[in-house]
Amino acid sequence: MAGVDAQGDAKSRVIITFRDAPTGSDIRKVSDAGGTVTRLFKIVPSLAAELPASAIESLRADPRVLVVEQDRRVQLLDAELDSSWGVKHIGAGLVHPTNQGAGVKVAVIDTGIDYNHPDLDANYAGGYDFVNNDSNPMDDQGHGTMVSGVIAAEDNGTGVVGVAPQARLYAVKVLGANGSGWESDVIAGVDWARANGAQVVNMSLGSSSASYSFQTAIANAHNAGLVLVAAAGNSGTCPPGGDTVIYPARFSQVIAVAATDSSDVRACFSSIGPAVDIAAPGVSVWTAYRGGSYRSASGTSLASPHVAGTAALVIASGVVGNTAVRDRLQTTADDLGATGLDKWYGYGLVDAAEAAGGGSPPPPPPPSTHDVAVTSLSAPGSVTQGGTVAVGMTVANQGTASEAFTVTLRDGASTIGSSPVSLAASASTTVNFSWNTTGVATGLHTLTATAGPVAGETDTADNSRTASVMVNGASSGSLSLQVTMAGLPRPGQYVPITVKVTNSGVPVSGATVDVVLDTQGSDQTMRKITDAGGYASFRFLIKSNAGLPWTIRATASSGGLSGSKTCTYNGASLAC
């Protein structure tokens, strides 16, 4: 693969899909091409990267690469029951005496959730922020909170009530405060929802096109059993014309939701097309908003969560499998517009009462469920031997009963620390540990955080998480550099140079490495960061008129330590 000159070559965001799961060698190819990997996915054999434009065609030609696509922008689409006219209109209130969607996991892929809102706090069960890359998906825009209010605002006598007021809400933040984000983050959000056991996913967002990787991620999430619901889009007109349904609603595996008003008439803004599956209230919907407030809003963004909430009710009623849930929603919908399936309303207006069997005698209360989990584990990637590592462990009670249990952090078989924890149902907390590495062997260590298990718990797969920490050798006062060059390059060719940084023989990850290549007075400079093995790779393009010998000056710094190495290349060998 041809390399690129990293200087003066603007980078663009891309999604690279390989023929199978990307390897360390594949990641190195991106780095060698002057790129930076920003996300790795498990749901698809793809990675997201920032890549110089001149390297894209070279990567496309690689036999390991299936497709290289631009990372696209996505954006949001712009008395208690009596205040929630849409929830009441679809008959959800008739279901609530017997079924409020208790325990069904609904992931809201959006701008986050105001999890302190008095109508949402009891139903919030956790999440992740892919915009800021942390476990605090607080809504800084408001859209995700509005969507969540329609799905699962609490039946607590104040404010509004959601379609499934006892469903468990997971905030998957992929859109920023400006209401936009990247397709790669949406893929990561779908991946997170699948990995964390979501049963229903609501996506009130989209764009006019989509990548192969996104389509594959949606298909794999559907095959994993998730019920995928999305807003059809707000690109409609009056009178209607054309096919304006956006992605991801346009994908066949996704339930595409159109918007109607209180008279069951399609809203002019609601997108139409053969991909529309079903309709729901989406005009002047009163719902929760960030800061503990409420707001009225319109759009297919508000129609979609009516269907996602109904799907939660259907699952809670005993319907098993995403195909069966979708069939139940379609067959019980109230036909609108042309008889049967049409491109304006799909199968018709969602009917929660009929879909979830409203009106039956109340069943006996369900037995308490017991389920605790480690939802995140944070630790630095490396430490110098003798230093102290701060480890943060977030645990959650995902069951319906209060629990008292012990959390433990181990390095292999050695216990670093343990702490008792008491959590109410649906609550979470963060426990902090300190790991003193004095006397700890150098090399890669795997830290394991464990919660419980508690009595009666059957799902223990999420009771532990691991994090890797490289313990580097104690400071020797300086870093050692090893400089190598591949092949015997000539003027007019690329010069591949690799620098390995060690401290007392132990690879140093995260070190800053600067290389200056002097080709008879014409200097080139490049900076890289070492990987977990202590390596940093460089590629320089040499001018055709450059003369020999060449001088390579490499310097490295990390944690207050530094080192350097100077080498000379005469065209036949490298001497350092």
Image (cartoon, rainbow, N blue to C red):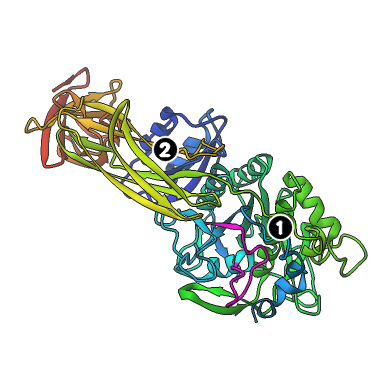
The reply, left or right, for residue 246 in relation to residue 439 is: right
Asked whether the residues under the numbered discs 1 and 2 touch, taking CB atoms below 8 Å apart as contact, a structural biologist would say no
What SS does tag 1 mark? helix
The residue lying toward the viewer, choosing from 313 and 111, is 313
Based on the picture, tell me whether residue 423 belongs to the magenta stretch: no
Give me the disc on residue 231.
Answer: none
Helix, strand or loop: magenta stretch: loop
Please say whether residue 183 is visible from this viewpoint.
Answer: yes
Question: At x 87% / y 60%, what residue is drawn?
Answer: 341
Q: Earlier in the sequence, mark 1 or mark 2?
A: 1
Residue under circle 1? 313
* Location of residue 259 in the rendering, given as x and y in whole percent from the top left corner: 73, 70
Residue under circle 2? 465
* Location of residue 176 in the rendering, given as x and y in whole percent from the top left corner: 46, 63
The residue lying toward the viewer, choosing from 553 and 381, is 381
| Disc 1: CA contacts within 10 A as few (<14), some (14-19) or many (>=20) | many
Question: At x 43% / y 57%, what residue is drawn?
Answer: 131
For this orientation, the residue located farthest to the right is: 339
The reply, left or right, for residue 247 in relation to residue 41 is: right
| Disc 2: CA contacts within 10 A as few (<14), some (14-19) or many (>=20) | some
User: Callout 2, which amino acid?
Assistant: Arg
Based on the picture, tell me whether residue 166 belongs to the magenta stretch: yes
Quadrant assignment for the N terminus: top left
From which residue to which does the magenta span run? 153-171
* Location of residue 226 in the rendering, given as x and y in whole percent from the top left corner: 66, 46
